[in-house]
Amino acid sequence: MRRIANKAGSKAAGGNARKEANVAEKLNLRERDLSACDTALCLIATGKYTRFLRQVMESAATHWPRAMPVVLTDDPDAVPSDIPHLSQHWPHRSWPYPTLLRYHAMLSAESVFRQFAFMFYCDVDMVVVARMEPEPYGEGRAGIDGELVGVTHPGFAGAFNRARYTYENRKESRAYVARHEGTVYYAGGFQGGATERYLHAARGLSEMADDDLSRGIIPLWADESLWNRYCIDHPPTVTLSTMFCLPDSWRVPQARLLAITKNHHELRS
């Protein structure tokens, strides 16, 4: 695990005394920053997706200061060193394995996440645009902190009919959802909860993925399909609105998290 990075000082030469002070600051920053943060923000960035790290980390530092980025990456040099964070190595794989195996990635850093009371996974190609502190954003709940937290998918909210939900429909898959099941379609891009509860979910989800893979099955929407099956069997204690996972092209004033418009084919090639 890499040390938490220090805020960069002035680029101008500051002499030996200033360099020594900067070194001392780096050594002391870990304890100070961890004590101020009760939430881990899990960011998985491998391959070309490392290009999104600065934007999401800077936006989280502004709007969610109690969240410490925990970056799982194959390229630690791509992680902005001037933004406090923790990082751990996670290898890059061809698509769709970077997303399908996200829960395996989280479990590889289980001891890191256990330093925090809460942990949330966020797609690295998102940006935080408004305050994420506990407030009544949930549906009938107080704030985003809950034992298990999901987000209503923006593509299937409001007046959409259940028949349009894109659940996995192959009975052979562990992600299979029958036609009579499911009342909410959850987005995969933001989820989390109390650390121990969410890690428990990650263990179950990784086992589901392994079971499917052992039989040559990749769920329709990979991890999102598995997450929706899991949420039917284990309903989230907090279901957040679509404001926590909106496309940036929608330009909704109440948005909290936006998914950045990008070329998926180019990123995954």
Image: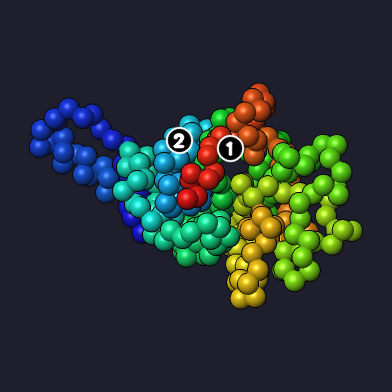
Q: In the figure, residue 260 lies in which quadrant? A: top right
Q: Residue at x 85, y 48 (%)?
A: 162
In this view, 8 is above or below 37: above
Q: Provide the residue designation for mark 1.
A: 259
Instruction: State the quadrant of the N terminus.
Output: bottom left
The residue located at (59%, 34%) in the rendering is 258
Within 10 angstroms of label 2, few (less than 14), some, or many (20 or more) residues? Answer: some
Residue placed under numbered mark 2 in the picture: 55
Q: Nearer the viewer, mark 2 or mark 1?
A: 1
x%, y% of residue 150? 69, 49
Does 234 sit left or right of 159 as displayed? Answer: left
The percent coordinates of residue 237 (x first, y second) are: 74, 52
**Residue 245 picture quarter:** top right
Tell whether label 1 touches label 2 (CB within 8 Å): no
Give the side of residue 11 with respect to residue 40, left or right.
left
Amino acid found under the numbered disc labelled 2: Gln
Q: Secondary structure at mark 1?
A: strand
Of callouts 2 and 1, the N-terminal one: 2
